Amino acid sequence: MKFGRFRHKTGEENVYFGTLSTDPGHSFINVVIDFDFNDLNYDGRQYKLTELEFLPPVTPTKIVAVGLNYKDHAEEMKLKITEEPMLFIKPNSSLLPHLGTIILPAASKRVDYEAELAIVIGKTAKNIKSKDAPGYIFGYTCLNDVTARDLQTKDIQYTRSKSFDTFAPMGPFIETEIENPAGLSIKGYLNGGLKQSSNISNLIFNPFELVEFISGIMTLFPGDVISTGTPSGVGPLSKGDVFEIEIESIGTLKNFI
């Protein structure tokens, strides 16, 4: 099931949660009411996808991101692989939907794309073991961990380089029917050219291990997001570019620069 969050293009303020259903030649959103991550209730309304604009599919209390979680990316950044996941937080204000525009800040002269698989939490999780983690995951989506690379190398920690508004594009949908994303391909395209290509099985710390590690530090609430790291091939973005993240069985996140 592909789950998302939308607003009608007429400009009305109502926000709709819904699931995607496809008929020949059309895509529809079945509207969800009384939204709960563990119990989706529909109200009978159905909109054509073309009538709606995408919003980030959830509004998390926090986005927990993982650095250097692919060996090849650590090597290209000339950084040592850590013995435990390296964590940082991206603020909610950095969220951007599918088809939104990433704004290049004046404070940075080098802003990079980073294609990532994101985990969306479905139940409150604290001190969860990896074997139990699937029961706490609502689904998976695409996230671009946009990074001001020059500021990242300048600062001691990553907060400034990762936190500008529009630096966390996410979506377009959350796929809820993946039991284990290991084996799925992940790709990043800059202006149609393939720049990143890997497989989720190449993660150093897999999604279930990340849920265990992070929930042992902080409580994860429904809707919280864990971004699992990026493979090699990161590179700069320029004004006028288009960047797309394609994850097998999940979908394609597209953003303009």
Image: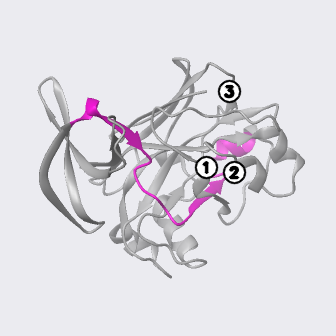
Disc marking residue 163: 2
Q: Position of residue 221 (x, y in %)?
A: 46, 72
Foreground of the two, 39 or 195: 39
Please tell me whether residue 255 belongs to the stretch shown in magenta: no
Q: Are marks 1 and 2 in contact (CB under 8 Å)?
A: yes
Q: Is residue 61 magenta?
A: yes
Q: Secondary structure at mark 2?
A: loop
Query: Please, what is the three-letter code of the amino acid marked with disc 2?
Result: Ser
Q: Position of residue 126 (x, y in %)?
A: 49, 81
The mark tally for this picture is: 3
Q: Going 57% across and 72% down the picture, which residue do you hit? A: 213
The scheme the figure's colours follow is one colour
What is the spatial separation of the Cα atoms under label 2 and label 3, in whole angstroms?
16 Å
Residue 244 percent across, percent down from the top left: 50, 29
Residue count near mark 1 (Cα–Cα under 10 Å), binned few <14, some 14–19, many ≥20: some
Circle nearer the N terminus (1, 3): 1
Numbered range of the magenta stretch: 48-75
Q: Which residue is mark 3?
A: 237
Query: Does residue 49 show up?
Result: yes
Per the rendering, the mark at residue 94 is 1
Left or right, 18 with respect to 207, comes to left
